Structure formats: structure tokens, C-alpha cells
Amino acid sequence: MTYKAPLEEMNFLIKDVFKIQDTLGDIEAFQDFDEDLYSAVLEESAKFSENILFPINRSGDEEGCHFDNGKVTTPKGFTQAYQEFAQGGWLGVSGDPEFGGQGLPKTINLLTEEMVYATNTSFCLYSSLTSGAYHAIHAHASDELKSTYLPPMLEGRWAGAMGLTEPHAGSDLGIIKSKAVPLENGQYRLNGTKIFITGGDQDLTENIIHLVLAKLPDAPDGPKGISLFLVPKVKVNVDGSLGESNGVSAGSIEHKMGIKGSATCVMNFDNAEGYLVGKENRGLYAMFTMMNLERLSIGIQGIGLAETSYQLSKEYALERKQGKNAQGEGTTILQHADVRRMLLSQRAYTEPARALAVFMGLQIDKQYHHQDEAVSKKAAGMMALLTPVAKAFFTDKGFESCNHGVQILGGHGYIREWGMEQLVRDAKIAQIYEGTNGIQAQDFLSRKICLDKRELIQELFQLIDNTLDKNSHLNEFNQLKTELVKVKKCVIETTDWLKQAFSERSYEIQGGAVDYLHAMGHLIYGWLWLEMLVAAESSGNEGLLARKKLAAAFFTQQLLPQAFELCRRVKQGYQVVMEANEELI
């Protein structure tokens, strides 16, 4: 089985749906780029992903990582692939040119990242963590730290890792025990243990730059007492060369359900020397620059794996003979209604997810590069609003798509030989790390909706209204428009109900947070399906339009109506559940 990057879909989004040239054309940082260059970058990324990464995906899963005497070894082929990845400049696609990056829009980087996740999720995690660490350092570190650490990271010689979780502290970071003590030379000495550290140790790069959350002496209790530190695995000399080991070591690696080619480490910091990033006791603020981008990245993982599952499923369905038609002729399983249901479910969720990712990439580009502060601030607000939706909905539906893939292949999906079961195992973790999807839903309902005084959700509703208004004359898409208006009304009513009930019933009604996020996800996808249909009709590509019409019709008739039941469940509340004795649960 093979994977082919969905380049037509990606180019359609950046050229026809969101018109990247017009959207970002007035930003000085991107004025030297054009759509032809963007397409060329996507094509080269496709070649690397298809020809280099996909062939070592299954073997990497079979072999996994190795741990011996404190050293981690990645699967066969990973080191060579990483060297080629770095030499190709893929780690610096959207990096700051001042530090050796190519300065391309983050929007394009997200699409290249999807292809890497789609073909080798384990491999992609090493580069995505490096990208996240780069952004946190770039946003919050001193000029000296940036000039020392960012160029080697963008070159791919050094990697990044994020040290948050501890054995006793998962999502509740306020109770971490790692300590940092200031030294006379302005550095800090760190001690502590972190667990579940992706890429905490590996043999791909000559150094690993850990961003570590720790507490200073006499720091306030809870999250307000957390600081962020840059801690290299190998000390860096004044001239940028590597020095001696820095008291950073892997204690073990985890044996996991999936992403077996990605080293998940227990990391020990024993009198390791580090540097403060940002301000004292403001570590979470600085780390969230990395975490929010990582949450979007993990959402992209869900899209990439869903796309791969769809492609492998359809390829199998076209070849697998099973049953006969009305004329008594042998048919493929693609003629079976239930198989078509699953294949169209994969497409109907994956294509608007990719559209939302591109939309969010444009918001990131505006946030960090637009000269108009008002535009930048508005884009930042939209990113903050949509990040938990993207992380949770992308990965929930991505996992669902991979499950559909196993079901379509039947017994061949369940056995290892075909590789479909690996997609399920690799997709599952995306619902868990970078904040579980339940936590994303709690954050969305509480902070982004009920406690948000800026009313960011109203800006999203306005975007949907704008799309409906400007296309009111298009009768061809009336069914989608009619259902979208109904769903929007239902979601708004549910949103108003949540806001009114939150002050008195916040703990109880949060039981409906996941359902509310999913209802919002369906509304957003309906909006983006309408945008894609309109753009496809204007594109002159009849084949593309026909495919979009079919998937959009399936979404409108079979999937979008789920939003009504989701909203009903939210307003039902969870009072009985939350008041029940623990012994009854």
C-alpha cells in the first residue's frame, strides 16, 4: 500500500479557498514569496514524505527505540532520514531568517507537517518538538540565548524537548517538585525528574535543548510559582561549540501502545546548568507559547493519520472482491453501502479539518508578522479560541477515521501485515498528550466561552454569517446553508445557556464540555464545507467540484445533524451524575 500527498487539496485551500497571496500579501515578511513557490515547497515535502519517511514507518514501529546504559537509539533508517530532513531545510521552513530560517508562512509549514505526520508520526514528533521549543525561545529568551541556540536548532544539528510532566504531576503542573537554584554567574542549577518526555534523548542530533519547568527557592505555591529554564544536554561553550555533559540523562524509555519509533523518556536533571527563559515565576506563560503551537501540531497529527487511513482504505476497497451485484456479477467492497459510509465519513471530517488548519495557520502568520497591531491582536484571539477545538476535534475524528480503516479492511486491518492497525495505535496518543481532549474541552467551555469577556466566539459566529450572506444567491448549496443556519442557532442557544448557568453550576455542567466542543466542531466544519464548495465551483475544476459536492452532501445529511443531539445532551446537565456517591460510579 502507498501514500500520495493530497497536493491538489492543499493547493486548492491556499489558492482558491483562502487565497494566501491576497491574505498575506500585505505582510512585509512574505512579500518575496508567491503561490508558485508555496506549491513547489509542498511538492518537495511530498516527495520526501512519500519516498523517505513512509518506507521506514512500519519497520520503525516493528523495531521501536532501544535503551542501553543511558543511551537511546532510534530505529534503523531514522538517523539517515533525519540528516536528509535537516539538510533539506525542513526544520527551518517558517523559522526567522535572522537565525537561519527560511521565513515562509506558518500556514505552509503546517501543510508540510501534515505530510510528515501522515507518513511517519514517530519521526515527525522529533521535529515538531524542536519547532515548539524554537518558538518558545524565540518569543521569550534573551538575545544572547536566541543567537546561541536557535541557529543550530533550525539547522537540525540540535533538537528541542519539553519537560513538564512529573511522576506525581500530570496536568496539574502547580505541584511539580523540580527545583532551580540561582548561581552567581547568572545561570541556575536544576534538579528533578520528568516523565513522558518525547525526544528527551535520541541519536539523531548532537545536542538536545530541554525547556524545563521548575520552581525557584521561595517561589509562590501553585502555577504562579513556576519558572521556565533552557537546559542543554551538552553544555555550550562561548564560541558555540559543544563542551562537557550537563547532568541531563535518560533513566529509561517507555514501552508504548504506539509511536514506537519516538523515544518517550524518563529524564533526570542532576545539578544540570540552565538559563532562565522569560521572567521568574512566569514559566507557564512562556511555555504556553510552545504548548499552544504543539497542540495545533498534534491536531495536525490527527489529520495526517486520517488522510493515510482514508487512502489505504480506499485502495483496499477498490481491490477487495466480496459479494455480487443485482446482475450476479462479482463486486468490490466499494460497492457496499456501509463501506461507502465509512470512506465518506473519513473524507467529510478530514477535508474541513485541513481547511481549519490552514485558516489557523493564517491567523498565526497575522499574529506574529502583521504590521497592524489590531489585526495581529484579533488573529491571536482567534487562535486562542480555536486551539482547543482543533487539538481535540482533529484528533478525535482522526482516531475515528483510523478505526474506520481497520473496519474496512476487516481481518486484514486487524493484523499487523497491512499496517492499518499501526495507524490506530499511533493516532490514540494524540487524544492524550499535550493536554487530554477532555481537558481541551474543559478549557474551551470554561475559559474560551463562559469566562471570556472579549466575546471571541461572537467573531467566529460573524465569520459564519459573512459566508452565508455573501453566498445567499447560490441556490445549488441550499441544503447545506439551511442546515448550517439551524445548527448555528442551536449552538448559539446552547452557548447562551452555558453562560447563564456557569456561575452556579460550573462544576456540574462541565460534564458536557466534550459534547459542546464536538457540536462547535460540526458547526465550524459545516461553515468550511460551504467555503470549499463555493471555491470549488469557481475553480473550473469539474472533478474537484464533483468530489466536494458528494462529500459535502454526505456531511450535511449524515454528520452535521449530530450537532443537535450533542447540544441537547449538553443542556441536559450532569447534576445526577455529579451528586452520586463515589461507590455508585
Image (spheres, rainbow, N blue to C red):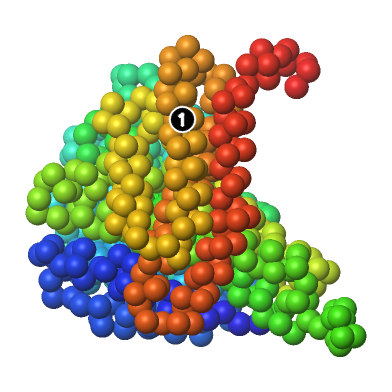
Residue at point 30% right, 73% down?
A: 15
Q: Is residue 347 visible?
A: yes
Q: Position of residue 340 (x, y in %)?
A: 70, 69
Residue 84's image quarter?
bottom left
**Left or right: 47, with 275 as reference point:** right
Q: Which residue is more in the foreground, 330 or 140?
A: 330
Of the 4 image quadrants, the one containing the N terminus is bottom right
Count of numbered badges drawn on the protein: 1
Residue at point 42% right, 62% down?
A: 475
Q: Position of residue 270 (x, y in %)?
A: 43, 41
Q: Position of residue 401 (x, y in %)?
A: 63, 60
Q: Which residue is more in the foreground, 125 or 386?
A: 386
Q: Amino acid at mark 1?
A: Glu
Q: Is residue 116 visible?
A: no
Q: Which residue is mark 1?
A: 493
Q: Is residue 113 above or below residue 140?
A: below
Q: Is residue 292 above or below residue 445?
A: below
Q: Position of residue 287 (x, y in %)?
A: 33, 41
Residue at point 32% right, 19% down?
A: 220
Residue at point 57% right, 79% down?
A: 3
